[in-house]
Amino acid sequence: MYAFDIERPATVAEAVAALSNEDAQALGGGQTLIPTLKQRLASPEKLVSLTGVAEMKGISSAGGVLTIGGGTTHDDVAADGSYKALSELAVNIGDPAVRSRGTIGGSLANNDPSACYPAAALASGATIVTNTREIAADDYFVGLFETALDEGEIITAVKFPIPEKANYQKFVQPASRFALVGVFVAKTADGVRVAVTGASNEGVHRWTAAEDALSKDFSAGALEGLSVSADDLIADLHGSAEYRAHLVAVMTKRAVAAAS
Amino acid sequence: MPKDGGIGASTVRREDVRFLTGTGQYCDDMNMFGQTAAVFARSTVANGVIKSIDTSAAEAMPGVLAVFTGEDFVEVGGNPAGWLINSRDGEPMKEPKRPVLAHGKVRHVGDAYAAVIAETVEQAKDAVEAIEADIEELPAIVNMKDALAADHYVHDEIGTNQCFDWGWIEDNRAATDAAIKGAHHVTTLELVNNRLVPNAMEPRCSMAQYNRANDEYVLHTTSQNPHLTRLLISAFVLGIPENKLTVIAPDVGGGFGSKIYHYGEEALVLAAAKKIGRPVKWTADRTEAFLTDAHGRDHVTKIELAMDKDGNFLAFRTETMANVGAYLSNFSTATPTFLHGTLMAGNYTVPNIYVNVKAVFTNTAPVDAYRGAGRPEATFSLERVIDKAAREIGMDPIALRRKNFIKPDQYPFASAAGLEYDSGNYDALMDQMEKVADMAGFEARRKASEKKGKLRGFGVNAYIEACGIAPSNLVGVLGSRVGLYDAATVRVNATGNLSVMVGAHSHGQGHETAFPQVVAEMLGIDPQSIDIVHGDTSKIPFGMGTYGSRSLAVCGSAVVRATEKIINKAKKIAAHMLEASDGDIELKDGVFSVAGTDKSVTFGEVALKAYIPHEFPLEDIEPGLEETAFYDPANFTYPSGAYCCEVEVDPETGKVSVESMTAVDDFGNVINPMIVTGQVHGGLGQGIGQALLENTTYDENGQLLSASYMDYVMPRADDLPFYTVDHSQGNACTHNPLGVKGCGEAGAIGSPPTVVNAVIDALQSGGKNVTHIDMPMTPHRVWSAMQNA
Ligand SMILES: Cc1cc2nc3c(=O)[nH]c(=O)nc-3n(C[C@H](O)[C@H](O)[C@H](O)COP(=O)(O)OP(=O)(O)OC[C@H]3O[C@@H](n4cnc5c(N)ncnc54)[C@H](O)[C@@H]3O)c2cc1C
């Protein structure tokens, strides 16, 4: 780890001001950033810890929309339960230490191609709320570790419309236990959305063919014969592109069957 | 006494109090006054020529005290191989020098070519980044087959990538070939024994002090055998006289083989401590552990089994390529040869065996003994090909094994691979396994799994291993450059308690509990009054350390011999105190008495007399009560076992889950059943890890892709089933005083083929014609095998 300064602002405004400094970086739960620093793979001069910003914490529900503060931990989301599929997703992130420190804002800002929350946000049609604007999930995820966030922009909250039925199925990469393939299925009055994480070189994405089929008939049987192309899927020591393509179909069926 | 703490008691491990309460003292916990930090500059390429190393900027960095490169160690020796192997043509193996720091060339990712000593670790890291090394990358030699065909070499000076081409037993070759040629049925299998990263919980750490006043060094280091480390440093690498070097291995957080060996970092910190006149400490980070700890296994094997029409085994023939990595680690040449080829008879009366092993240099981390060391490789090859053969000839796999088992009346049994097995009863082990694993209920469990959409399989395995390593005279003939005895000193203190100095090092094995149980049993005293001392060359007589399931069988035997000497001398002292003759003195429950009388003295009174020798027959008996014994075993010991497991395979994803695992082992006599069970548990976890999870992967450039826990799959609790462990079927070892055989490696030897056999059974039950899948059987591999079937 290289030496750095740390600030711990109490409000979003103070945090934004602190982040205007060049070479300053936001620190959420540190579950991704701190290991990166330890490996000397990043060298910010200043870290701006968001853990003291009270207005970024907590979960509230109104009008069928669940609003989660950007600094809310995975543990708190897991315990909430008002959006069951989302809480179940949070329960299976990492280990107890990761869940008690890691935050939803940090996860979405990082946009790891194998992370879980991006699938939930995209499938749920969530809105990412920042200190300057609101971004629809469809516009937010740009690519591997890339998002629509500007330099110094902070995720203050995420708004999830609670679907009628939803489920997340994660087939774990056996070492990291991130998603080798994860599929989040959400059914609302407007139709069905299916988001896939872990599989693609483009990052989290929707499987529209499955969405069309499921919007007509929300059953695992409706997916019979549907498959995704292995082109552009990730191939690594844990699985080929073809294997991931196969798992996308299997996990989608399981998510539909388990949706509640 | 010792009703509750002697031989056979499941005494709770006393060392666990400090391990579980965070009060252990590991190397990195220790800090010395004036201590400095060493950090290494390591190669990021697998193969490269060192054109130049400019350390001037690094030397000028804040806090930097010294910078070393390979140039500084050109005059000193190399880290040697401990076992000379001769090729089939009689040529000795190739032994390129393994320097303290790479010189001329770097040969694997992680190969250290420079080191910085600074006031703090962070300063040393900064300075390492400031070293300007011009290293010209060369094509990496990674794959063993390619390495043997290549015209460029890991070590240019030897002009080949083949270390040796060994035949065992060369004189059996023609007969084996003939038996295979004329056989009714021959089953052939090509398989990989996957490379494993040891992953001890505690990374390596070495700290050196140098005392200018008397020219003495102290090295604290993570070692399984401090005396061997001292011997290697003194006699081969740095030439520090043995009497000027103390090596201390305090609490060590796991080794599994990887901490047997001497590593260059140990020599570096010693040299640095002398140069700067201050203590120097180096602690590996996890990445360094992945890249530089000696890895395990990594064999590619073709095995053939020849049978007659009734399924009698006629011959086993194997051809193996064994990866030794970029340099020869200390036991790397013994592991694929004498710890592997000699075991190729397994538990069977097969008359013809021929083993060919080619050891191959590659631009990868050195490979050496890892829990089981050669014997898992032998067992895996045998038990996989036997399973395949059973399917091919339509015979039950257990029946085929039983048909060929050595029978109890055949001991001592001279195997066709050159060992003499002293005792065993493999049918009894199999009987017990069938019983405790509830084999009768398997079909019902298979149906239940099928109902859930899962394929269930049953896999079985029989193994034998050679432990209690090893008879020095025998291994000397076979090429070992060391003896493999062990030593113990039993010191009875004046107040009647005991310190027992042992050469075996305990780093998870429970010696601190088990060894006192032996002494307590012999003396009839409270085991709590006995402590063992280990891991410090200045305190213990000598020792060859802990590996090869040898501690109790070899060092424990030395403890017995030394304790016998104590008893003899104590009887003499008691006889004098009781005015009787030695021959009339009996020892029972810690009391010496004159046979047939009520005259007696306690063990404590005798001890006090020995140290306060008033009215003592000094002309006949020396004062004091301390005895040393060295014990060299007459033979290996031969633990054996019958294992089975049941797996469920998810046919949609290829994911395997181990539903049950039964291990029935013959460890001979058992001193502490609880510790033995724990050792088996650990071994099973590692074996299941090898079979399903552990995926060491180098890419074609020699980069280790699985160099962190984000990609290297260690077994976790939820990957493992509850185990059924049974050691009720012990047949005492016939040649050591405790009748013990050794239990440390069994689980890791017996379980991998068991799991693979079960997965194949599951897939076949699902109508998939899959005959083999290489380990680790990841979901992806199992799914792919099903796609292609
Ligand atoms: C062992 C382990 C297992 C894991 N398993 C999983 C898993 O199964 N599934 C999964 O999805 N994730 C997993 N993770 C990742 C975990 O969820 C992280 O917590 C998360 O990715 C990052 O959140 P954080 O709050 O820790 O962010 P940090 O590590 O603090 O920051 C990550 C990045 O986000 C930025 N950032 C942080 N907060 C904000 C904010 N509010 N606004 C804008 N930018 C911000 C930081 O500047 C940094 O660039 C795992 C992590 C570990 C260590």
Image: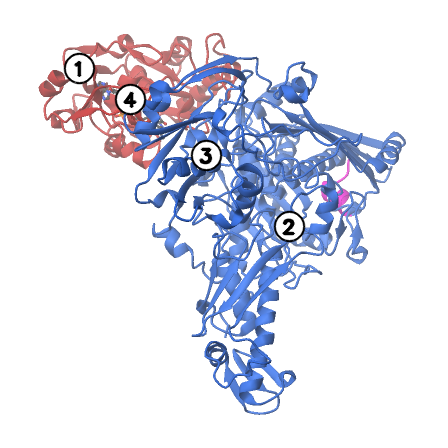
Chain colours: A red, B blue
Identify which amino acid the numbered label 2 is placed on.
Leu
Q: Chain of mark 2?
A: B
Helix or strand or loop: what does disc 1 sit on?
strand
User: 10 Å neighbourhood of mark 1: few (<14), some, or many (≥20)?
Assistant: some
Reading the image, the residue beneath label 3 is B268
Q: Position of residue B736 (x, y in %)?
A: 67, 61
Q: Identify the mark at residue B583; answer none if there is no mark.
A: none
Q: Is mark 1 within 8 Å of ligand 1?
A: yes
Chain for numbered disc 1:
A
Q: Amino acid at mark 4?
A: Ser
Q: Are marks 3 and 4 on the same chain?
A: no
Separation of disc 1 and disc 3 at Cα?
Answer: 53 Å
Magenta region:
B394-402
Neighbour class for label 2 at 10 Å: few (<14), some, many (≥20)? many
Could you say where residue B233 lies in the image, as x and y percent from the top left?
53, 41
Residue occupied by mark 1:
A130
Q: Amino acid at mark 1?
A: Thr
Q: Is residue B395 magenta?
A: yes
Say which residue label 4 marks.
Answer: A107
- Chain for disc number 4: A
Closest to the camera, between mark 3 and mark 2, is 3
Q: Which residue is mark 2?
A: B484
